[in-house]
Image (spheres, rainbow, N blue to C red):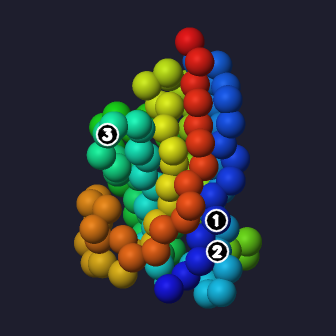
Amino acid sequence: QVQLVESGGGLVQAGDSLRLSCAASGRTLSTYPMGWFRQAPGKEREFLAYINWNGITTYYAKSVKGRFTISRDGAQNTVYLQMNSLKPEDTAVYYCAASLAGGIPITAGAYNSWGQGTQVTVSS
């Protein structure tokens, strides 16, 4: 398994932007499809965004499409989630994950390696 560490979370106001990073250690991320999820208190883990191994294909949940952008930097062995126009309902712990599944996996069960999460809090 690849080891993943998220960073970049914090407390922001509604309308602000944040960029989350997901750095890998132990193995290269370059062959893994990657995803971002979030989980708010009392709610299930929610799929947000997917990017394939070479960064050509991306896919977003309706709730974040047009506001969030997933990208990857092979040289830095890092995947990013740029979040714009943040809303209070975006408050959650955000996770990155690596998948071994084909297609465009949008369920948590399709991902094999997870980071520890980073907290994002958006105040109104």
Q: CA gap, disc 1 to disc 3?
A: 22 Å
Vertical placement of residue 112 versus 89, above or below? below
Vertical placement of residue 104 versus 47, above or below? below
Q: Do the residues under discs 2 and 1 have CB atoms within 8 angstroms?
A: yes
Amino acid type shown at disc 1:
Val
Tag 1 secondary structure: strand
Instruction: State the mark number for residue 5.
Output: 1
Q: CA gap, disc 2 to disc 1?
A: 6 Å
Instruction: State the mark number for residue 24.
Output: 2
Q: Position of residue 58 (x, y in %)?
A: 41, 58
Q: Residue at x 28, y 78 (%)?
A: 102
Residue where numbered disc 3 is placed: 43
Graded by Cα atoms within 10 Å as few (under 14), some (14 to 19) or many (20 or more), the crowding at tag 3 reads few
Q: Do the residues under discs 1 and 3 have CB atoms within 8 angstroms?
A: no
Choose the circle earlier in sequence order: 2 or 1.
1
In the figure, is residue 109 to the left or right of 74? Answer: left
Query: In front: 57, or 91?
Result: 91
Vertical placement of residue 40 versus 36, above or below? above
Screen quadrant of the C terminus? top right
| Quarter occupied by residue 123 | top right
Q: Position of residue 120 (x, y in %)?
A: 59, 37
